[in-house]
Amino acid sequence: MRRNRRTDWSRRLVRENSLSVNDLIWPVFVMEGKGLTQPVASMPGVLRHTVDRIGAAAKEAQALGIPVIALFPQIDPAAKDVTGSEATRPGNLVCRAIKAIKDAAPDLGILCDVALDPFTDHGHDGVLQDDCILNDETVDILCAQALVQVEAGCDIIAPSDMMDGRIGAIRRALDAAGHQDVQIMAYAAKYSSAFYGPFRDAVGSAKTLGKASKSTYQMDPANTDEAIREVALDIAEGADMVMVKPGMPYLDIVHRVKKEFGIPTFAYQVSGEYAMLKGAIQNGWLDNDRVVLESLMAFKRAGADGVLTYFAIEAAKLLNR
Ligand code: PBG
């Protein structure tokens, strides 16, 4: 076995998988204000950008060859309410950021999360009533949210809420409004995970969840077959691409989904995974460049077509070197 590993050229020759800048989707945080970038404490190296600053970030991503940017807003607490009504207002932070990105970097795809958690005062992804998240009432609002984002210029709608039936409802709403070309990337197998902790800090939705649990809509980390059923439903309802989330602890799911359906399959290397790696890197316990690229290659080996990763910019720089 070692003959093929002896030289660099031979290792490159027999390499089974490859990682390129085309595999990267860059999640970015936007906030209100002017002329500011603000570090996210629990995600060393990650910034929130004001709308007037997001264009420059998008330009950098486009210049590096990153195909898609994914937008996540930190909503002003005064604009939050129990139904997340700010999510459906055409002039909201996400819509303004979409326009700024399209102006600055017209060749960059824009992906938007569809879920209410950045917009609700309780931090849940849907409408909360008597400690329950209402499914169909939420789906109606998600359709309206998807529409305002698309009308602002969003290219890929990514429902991350885990309500039942939302992919079909959003597809019908988009088609009825003449947006047949807008793609849907379903957060199809999204687990109720402790690895989202730093993200909730980044968008300011932490600590408000109350008595209701995200486990009543996100998947149980113990389950595998259920992920296959979730993905099958989302494909039947019209998803163009599917996602597994979190990423590295769920590579078995990525592998099984890709094998079973052969559909474009993405993984989200989530905030907690990023924080774990960066924390160890900052302590000098892991080598930054090697561990960033190895962690991303692992997704490709498992069968993913691409990765949503907070490392996108630095990985693109390493890959373009
Ligand atoms: C919102 C959403 C979450 C993430 C992406 N979209 C948080 C959650 O569901 O609680 C997490 C991303 C990350 O941790 O990097 N529904």
Image (cartoon, grey):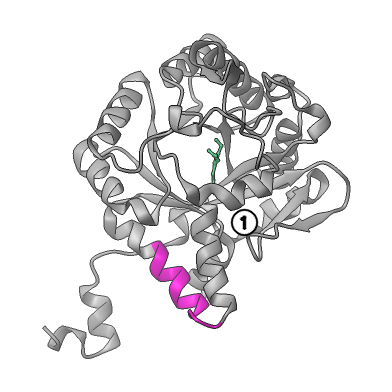
Residue 315 belongs to the span the image colors magenta = no
Residue, far right: 34
Decide which of 281, 305 is in the foreground and name it. Answer: 281
Residue 234 point in image, percent of width and height: 35, 25
Horizontally, residue 307 falls left or right of residue 86, namely left
Question: Which residue shows up at 72% across the image and 45% down it?
Answer: 30
Question: Which residue shows up at 32% across the image and 29% down it?
Answer: 230
Q: Is residue 147 above or below residue 57?
A: above
Query: What's under tag 1, amino acid-wise?
Result: Ala
Residue 144 point in image, percent of width and height: 62, 16
Decide which of 82, 316 is in the foreground and name it. Answer: 82
Residue 10 point in image, percent of width and height: 22, 83
Taking the image in four quarters, ligand 1 sits in the one at: top right
Highlighted range, magenta: 284-296
* Dominant SS in magenta: helix
Q: In this view, does 278 lie above or below 58?
A: below
Q: Is there any visible trace of residue 103 in the rendered image?
A: yes
Horizontally, residue 6 falls left or right of residue 116, namely left
Residue 121 point in image, percent of width and height: 71, 28
Secondary structure type for disc 1: helix
Q: Assign the N terminus to one quadrant of the image.
A: bottom left
Residue with the mark numbered 1: 61
For ligand 1, tell me if the residue under mark 1 lies within 8 Å.
no
Residue, far front: 211
* Mark 1 surroundings: few (<14), some (14-19) or many (≥20) residues within 10 A: many
